[in-house]
């Protein structure tokens, strides 16, 4: 057994999966409350990635950086989360709110329309070509003082940043949803919107908060992807959004731990199929997992089967 | 001054005219029941009072203020609360969290609110960490009532409190309603079970296809020939 390859792919898979998990969380949160598949969500991630790129440029880039790298990273994350969150809120306000009581196909088509709009607007404003994040040594292998990795195992700073950052965000989200009144109102609204309204919960506010938080997580995922792969371009949200959607469905859409589990599953499946088989087959493996889960557990790994109680 | 006053209210669902010129009043501290068969507009009346649906014509006055165009949250802050039909608990949340949602507009409830509700339903204190969906029907009814009482309402709306409960629990449920009423809370109880509800109510209204067909003191209604034929089955 080649442990070097195994470890390398394991860490790559987890960091990749963390990015999917962050996007999948937003998919799942919005679905949980509105029963809407927000296909524009991947494009929020793209915008977040571009915001991170813009921040690097503003602070002078790699050659002329005016603040420490760690501070730059924090500013990038905060701005991408804020920008992504506000974009999500605007999408809800202008595209979805009017369709709240329309047949479900109407907001679904609208979501696709918003997705095309964002992709084409980004292409118009930012150009169709790939842009590059400066790397700041994020991609260099980590050097540990008291611990030596097996030879030729490659773990980069970027991967460590992504995994640690995702853990922080997921823990913060869990605390928010479990402990705060607004988080509880979200769970209540997602279980029974009319009953929540009857308690005096302002459902509009809850929905806005859901879009903000879900989209902020996608914005953070955009920055994480930028520091790992350096490249940003207007259509990056399509594929990432697709994999994250699969992750949400595999985990059980509407279920937040499921979104994280699904993200990690898809990330690891991709990494190991690239490492041990061939990158050509990684999509086949991902879709095979999706199909297998749908056959065995149609409501997803952690999703609850719909029970109608009389 | 009446606590609640509906004045010539017309409520529509799309093109369908549900409530037709409904006028009713509730005095402070009064227990009023609203009777009627299926699809007579009972639930719609409650939704109109609460602001879940808004009437096309007419006014809703609560506690001296015209709230016809005010949102649900405003009315609840002003002192309305509801025990919805079928209870509508938040099943995947704990009993404690359900109670907190009842006091959402009051920051999730003060210790005093919890004490008041736990005193009325000691069982809820015992079961506070249990998921609401795992409780029995009678226990769920207590959670639903406790949740509504968390906001210290002046007027409590109850939609079919006897529905889906075993006869012994119906009796218990109405005992609790009476107990809450005696603590000074006005109540509007919507029921199909006319017998039980008239026995504890001060006054009653009878709806039929969205129109008021009878109103009066509960004792008089119990003696009314038409009502007895239609609802009391004797």
Image (cartoon, helix red, strand yellow):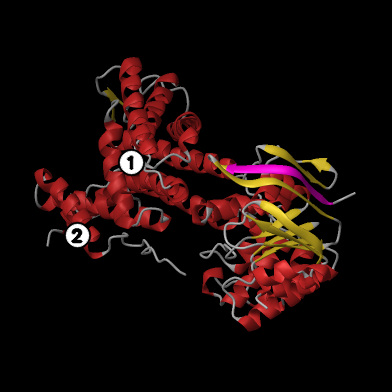
Using the rendered image, report if marks 2 and 1 lie on a common chain: yes
Residue B118 placement (x, y as % from top left): 73, 72
x and y percent of residue A73 in the render? 43, 34
Q: Give me the chain letter of mark 1.
A: A
> Dot 2: what SS?
helix
Overall secondary structure of the magenta stretch?
A: strand
Kindly identify the residue that appears in the image at 40 percent across and 23 percent down.
A54
Q: Name the side, left or right, on which A154 lies relative to A259.
A: left
Locate residue A50 relative to residue B97 in the image: left or right: left
* Residue stretch rendered in magenta on the structure: B3-12
Q: Nearer the viewer, residue A128 or A77?
A: A128
B84 is higher (above) or lower (below) than A207: below
Q: Which of pointers 2 and 1 indicates the residue nearer the eye?
A: 2
User: How many numbered discs sit on the rendered protein?
Assistant: 2
* Chain letter for the residue marked with disc 2 in the picture: A
Q: Which residue is farthest bottom? A: B168
Question: Which numbered circle lies on residue A292?
Answer: 2
**Observer-nearest residue: A300 or B88?**
B88
- The answer to whether residue B171 is visible is yes
- Residue beneath label 1, please? A158
Residue at the image point whose x is 84% and y is 68% from the top: B183
Residue B54, quarter of picture: top right
| Front residue of this view, candidates B185 and A127 | B185
Q: Is residue B193 visible?
A: no
Q: Position of residue B210 (x, y in %)?
A: 64, 51
Q: Quadrant of the C terminus of chain B?
A: bottom right
Task: From the viewer's perspective, tell me whether residue B122 is left or right of residue A291.
Answer: right
């Amino acid at each position: 057994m080649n442990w070097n390859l195994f470890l390398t792919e394991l860490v790559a898979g987890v960091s990749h999966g963390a990015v999917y998990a962050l996007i999948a969380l937003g998919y799942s949160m919005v679905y949980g409350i509105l029963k809407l598949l927000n296909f524009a969500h991947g494009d929020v991630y793209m915008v977040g990635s571009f915001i991170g790129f813009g921040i690097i440029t503003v602070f002078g880039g790699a050659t002329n950086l005016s603040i420490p790298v760690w501070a730059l990273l924090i500013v990038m994350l905060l701005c991408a989360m804020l920008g992504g969150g506000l974009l999500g809120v605007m999408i809800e306000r202008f595209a979805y709110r009017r369709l709240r009581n329309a047949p479900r196909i109407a907001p679904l088509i609208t979501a696709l329309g918003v997705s095309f709009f964002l992709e084409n607007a980004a292409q118009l404003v930012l150009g169709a070509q790939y842009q590059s994040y400066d790397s700041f040594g994020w991609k260099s292998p980590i050097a540990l003082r008291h611990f030596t990795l097996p030879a030729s195992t490659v773990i980069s700073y970027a991967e460590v940043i992504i995994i640690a950052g995702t853990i922080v965000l997921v823990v913060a989200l869990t605390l928010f949803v479990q402990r705060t009144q607004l988080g509880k109102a979200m769970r209540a609204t997602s279980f029974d919107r009319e009953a929540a309204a009857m308690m005096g919960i302002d459902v509009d506010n809850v929905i806005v908060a859901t879009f903000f938080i879900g989209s902020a997580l996608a914005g953070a995922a955009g920055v994480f992807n930028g520091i790992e792969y350096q490249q940003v371009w207007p259509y990056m949200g399509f594929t990432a959004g697709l994999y994250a959607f699969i992750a949400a469905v595999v985990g059980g859409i509407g279920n937040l731990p499921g979104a994280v589990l699904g993200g990690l599953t898809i990330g690891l499946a991709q990494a190991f199929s690239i490492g041990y088989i061939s990158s050509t087959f990684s999509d086949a493996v991902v879709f095979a997992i999706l199909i297998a889960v749908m056959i065995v557990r149609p409501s997803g790994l952690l999703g609850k089967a719909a029970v109608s109680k009389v | 001054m009446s606590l609640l006053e509906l004045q010539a209210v017309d409520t529509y669902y799309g093109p369908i005219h549900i409530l037709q010129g409904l006028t009713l009043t509730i005095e402070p501290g009064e227990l009023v029941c609203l009777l009627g068969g299926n699809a007579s507009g009972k639930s719609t009346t409650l939704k109109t009072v609460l602001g879940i649906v808004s009437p096309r014509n007419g006014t809703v006055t609560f506690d001296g203020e015209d709230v016809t165009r005010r949102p649900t949250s405003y009315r609840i802050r002003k002192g309305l609360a509801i025990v919805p039909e079928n209870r509508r608990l938040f099943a995947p949340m704990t009993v404690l969290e359900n109670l907190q949602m009842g006091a959402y507009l009051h920051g999730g409830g003060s210790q005093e609110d919890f004490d008041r509700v736990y005193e009325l339903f000691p069982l809820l204190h015992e079961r506070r960490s249990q998921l609401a969906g795992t409780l029995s029907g009678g226990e769920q009814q207590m959670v639903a009532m406790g949740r509504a009482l968390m906001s210290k309402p002046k007027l409590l709306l109850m939609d079919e409190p006897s529905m889906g409960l075993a006869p012994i629990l119906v009796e218990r449920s109405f005992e609790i309603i009476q107990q809450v009423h005696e603590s000074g809370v006005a109540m509007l109880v919507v029921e199909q079970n006319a017998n039980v509800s008239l026995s504890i109510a001060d006054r009653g209204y009878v709806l039929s296809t969205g129109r008021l067909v009878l109103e009066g003191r509960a004792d008089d209604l119990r003696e009314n020939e038409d009502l007895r034929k239609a609802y009391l089955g004797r």
